[in-house]
Structure formats: structure tokens, C-alpha cells
Image: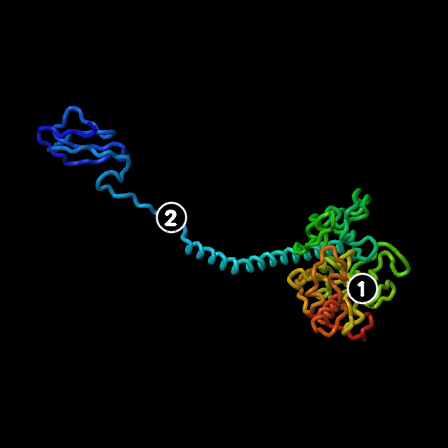
Amino acid sequence: MNTLEKPARAASAHLVFCSADFQSAVLRISNPPSSLTQGACRLEVGDTAGWKPALPTANAQNVRGARPAIRTSHGFTLIGLLVVIVTLAILATVLLPTLARSKAQARQTICLNNMRQLMLAALLYADNNAGIWFPNQPSQDSWVNGYMEWNDGGFPWSSTNRQLLVTQRGSALANATGDFSFFAPYIQDPSVYKCPSDPSTADGGGPRTRSYSANQAVGTIWNTAGQCVIAGHPVTGQWLGGELNDCEGYGHVFQKVSQMNRPNPVNLFVFAEEHPDSINDSTLAVQIATTTVGGDFIDCPSNLHDGAGSFSFADGHAVIHRWQGPILSKAPFVQGGSFSAAFPIVNVGSKPGDLLDLNWLQSHTSSPVNPNTRFPTPGN
């Protein structure tokens, strides 16, 4: 039979239960028969009167009185997920501009440090050369050689070869390439010459190596190159009069600190961060002859620091100067572009901010040799 027969003697069951894995049931009875089995269940002897058949148990739900298992969910609800997404979006809106400003400030700090190191190298050069400032006449050996070009696909890769910036005059590499820096004994890290905000690259060669140029009115002529370009003399300041002219002598030029009085060292910039679409040789040219509406920019300083550019001065300090007018402050960066692509207008018109920018640049570059010429005074 498939069921257990009740014995003649009285007996009663008082407990039926299953083991923890629900694979066997236990029936406690008194005076059970010698053999009693039911499927996978087993019987234990106990003090009961009577017994009942053990229940077949495939799982806990087959046991009478057993409580069904309660399922619990630990996942997100749709509303909870939406709340998380909205919260993250709000945090991103708040934090991303802050992170962007922090990165921009970090780049400005690096740029200012670069400018200070260039000034330190210039001062050390002067100390080691009887107070004479570094070579800086255009179209000859200068404080740093090599043009910044857009196409740098051939030897010696002057626009992208960082090693040339720390190559000393007379070395094998300098003799082979013609490129070197008079600051190489003082600056051994080529990254000093590049602003981290400068994104310019040369096709086929990678990032360009230099962002900074020197004031064309500061420095010494290294090689004789004509009647007015004489080795050992001060630079000619060839663009100060408004046209390319090495013999005009329109503005003051500065070969020694003792000559720096108009403007004085605090207001005379020595190095400037030049706009990537303007930079070529190692000098920044500024005309000081026309200081009113109609005056023009020859070379243009950078605006890569949110409409501002860096300058270092003859006394050693450096600043980030913010431009006021659209000619300088709004000039775009055009990768591989020409000067006119970034500066389609270089003549000051009716917008007062442009004239303020031109006058600031002029007054921190030089001043007319004729003391009776009206000229803006240096300002902040």
C-alpha cells in the first residue's frame, strides 16, 4: 500500500515536522511498528499516542501550516532612478563650470611662471654680459632662433623640435641646424617656452614649441647687417615708427637697464604671449607713432586666457592683462590660418576698447624720442 496502516494499539501523534532542507519529514509517535517508511520521510520514536502518515515534502509549501517565503526586491524603482539622474545632472551643472575655471586658472599660473623664468634668464644673461641685454634683432641670431610655422614637415623642424630651445650656441646640433637659444645655459626645460593654453600645431609635426616673443625695442644686435644694423648696438626697433625701417629711430630702444626710463622697468614689458596666428619670429612688433583712432596693431598679443594674455616686465614681475576691445579680446584661434584670418581688422575704429588696448601696448613698449610728442602714459 502507498499509505501507512493504523496499528490496533492506541497511539497519537503530537508533532510532525520537516528537516531544514525539507527533504525528510519526522513523525514522533509512541510504540510505532517495527517498520514504517513513507517516501523520503523517516520516523523517530517519541511519547505520543497515535500517529499519522508523514506528509510527502518536495518543498516547504507542501507542509501544512508552513509560511510561504517572502520575496524582497533590492533594485531601483523607476522614480528612484529618475531622482538619481536629475540629482547627477544638477551636480554636473554646478560643478563643471567650477572645474573648467580651476583648469583655466591652473594654466594661467603655469603661463605666468614661464614668463618669470624667461625674465630670470634675461637678467642672468645681462649679469653675465656686462649689463648688455640679450640679442633680439629680427632676421638674425636672437635670444631664441626658429620661426613658428604651420607647415613643419622638414629638417630641422624648427616649429616642433623642443630640443632646439635648449640647444646652446656652438653645439653640434646648433651647427647642424642653425637653431639654438642664448638662454639655453639658464633654461633646460623646453616647456617654459610654451603656454599650456596654446593649442597650435604644425602639420605633420605635432604641437608647436613656442608661445612667447620679446619686445622689439629691447635687446642687442648680434650681427652687422647694413648701415643701421651694427653688431653690439641696441636693436633698431624697426616698427616703432609705424613702418619697417631700421634707420628711422622714432622710439627709444633699450640695451641696458640704465637706459630704461621711458618707460621705467616696472612698466616696460620684455616678453609677451603672442597670439598663435600672429607669432612668427622671436619678436613682438608694436608701432607707437599713431596713438589715436586709425592706429594699427603690427603683431598681436594673445587672448587665450579668456580674453587676456601674459606679459613679463623688466623689473621681473609678470601679469595677465585683460583686453578691452574686440580686435584683441575676440580674435579667434584659427589652426593653420593666416594673420588676417584671426585679425581681419587691425586698425582702431570707433570702439573705445580697441584704442585703450592699443595705447596700453604702446605705452608699455617704448616712447617717442621727441619728448614733445603727445604719448599715452602707462596704465594698468
Residue drawn 23% across and 38% down?
63
The quarter holding residue 177 reads top right
**Which residue is identified by label 2?**
74
Q: Nearer the viewer, residue 248 or 161?
A: 161
Residue at the extreme right of the image, as rendered:
227
Residue density around tag 1, few if under 14, some if 14–19, many if 20 or more, within 10 Å? many
Q: Is residue 317 visible?
A: no
Q: Is residue 227 left or right of residue 315?
A: right
Residue tagged 1: 253
Q: Can you say which quadrant of the picture contains the N terminus? A: top left
Question: Tag 1: residue type?
Answer: Val
Q: Give the total of numbered labels.
A: 2
Pick out the residue farthest to the top: 34
Tag on residue 219? none
At a point 71% along the width and 69% down the height, the residue shown is: 357
Is tag 1's residue or tag 2's residue first in the polypeptide sequence?
A: 2
Quarter assignment of residue 6: top left
- Measured as percent of width and height from the top left, residue 219 is found at 79, 59
The single residue placed furthest to the left in the displayed view is: 9
Mark 1 to mark 2 CA distance (whole Å): 78 Å
Q: Secondary structure at mark 1?
A: loop
Q: Quadrant of the C terminus?
A: bottom right
Q: Amino acid at mark 2?
A: His
Q: Quarter of the image holding residue 308? A: bottom right
Position of residue 136 measured from the top left corner of the image (x, y, whole percent): 80, 57
* x, y percent for residue 327: 72, 67
Which of the pair 207/315 is nearer the observer? 207
Question: Which of the two marks, 1 or 2, is nearer to us in this view?
Answer: 2
Q: Nearer the viewer, residue 180 or 77?
A: 77
Q: Is residue 140 left or right of residue 184?
A: right
* Residue at 71% over, 65% down: 328
